[in-house]
Image (cartoon, grey):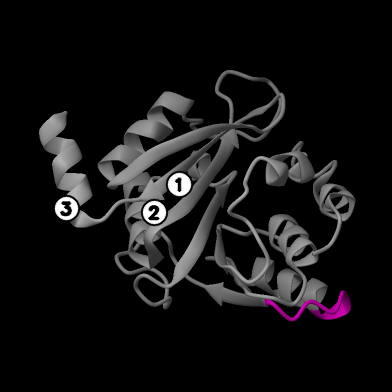
Amino acid sequence: MQSFGGAQRAVTGESFLDLGAILRQLSFVTPGKYMADFGCGSGYLTSALAQYMGDAGKIYAIDVQQHALDVVKQQSQSRGFTSIEPIRANLEASHGTPLRDNSLDVVWMVNLLFQNQRKDAIFVEAYRVLKPGCMLVVIDWIPNLTVGPEGYRLSLEEVMQLAQRGNFAFVQKIQAGRYHHGSVYMKQGASQAQSQQKAG
């Protein structure tokens, strides 16, 4: 496992995120895990995770833009990362990725939801590929700030509602910096989700 310092440098100035501080809050992110970076873009999170994780496990870098995936591939090759696998996929489509059902330990959605229309569909895909009891990490821009890109920014409460509709159970909030909110959710089994719906 690499130090947090390297992971932090990988994102500083590009996303306003301190990934080192975020990882320290997530005890379930450990070497050997199989993870997906939904909407990876140019791969700042993917690369930082690969540096933190070392050669153990796998990180699927998923994006709809081929040029972004080309950057991810080039960076992973130049830095000697062997755990990254770029995948071109439309996360808003039904069964949008080629990943197997119940195959992942962690799915990341970082700076993704504000720029997508079919947000529910992305949660559906995350639910499909995660193993039962495994974790979804959502970090996105806080609404009504002048800093950051344009787009419809969800509040934390709206993200929690999306996750609940997608049969995820809220686990914890995470400190993600001045400009982002962060939260963690666990994939529930069908019986757990039904029980929760009846209780609600």
> Which type of secondary structure does the marked residue at label 2 adopt?
helix
Q: Between disc 2 and disc 1, whose residue precedes?
A: 1
Q: Position of residue 138 (x, y in %)?
A: 52, 43
Q: Amino acid at mark 3?
A: Ser
Q: Between disc 3 and disc 2, whose residue precedes?
A: 2
Residue at position x 65%, y 58% from top?
41
Circles 2 and 1: CB atoms closer than 8 Å: yes
Q: Is residue 145 left or right of residue 198?
A: right
Residue at position x 68%, y 20% from top?
146
> Which type of secondary structure does the marked residue at label 1 adopt?
loop
Residue 196 drawn in magenta:
no
| Residue hosting label 2 | 122
> Residue reaching furthest front?
27
Is 76 above or below relative to 169? Answer: below
Residue at position x 74%, y 81% from top?
82
Magenta segment's dominant SS is loop
Question: What is the C-alpha distance between the residues marked 3 and 2?
Answer: 22 Å
Splitting the image into 4 quarters, where does residue 185 fall?
A: top left
Q: Position of residue 46 (x, y in %)?
A: 69, 62
Question: What is the C-alpha distance between the residues marked 2 and 1?
Answer: 9 Å
Depth check, front residue: 172 or 101: 172
| Residue hosting label 1 | 116
Q: Between disc 3 and disc 1, whose residue precedes?
A: 1
Depth check, front residue: 136 or 157: 136
Q: Is residue 17 left or right of residue 38?
A: right
Of circles 2 and 1, which is in front?
2
Which contiguous range is marked in magenta?
77-83
Q: Amino acid at mark 2?
A: Ile
Depth check, front residue: 170 or 19: 170
Circles 3 and 2: CB atoms closer than 8 Å: no
Q: Amino acid at mark 1?
A: Asn
Q: Where residue 191 is drawn, which disc sits there?
A: 3
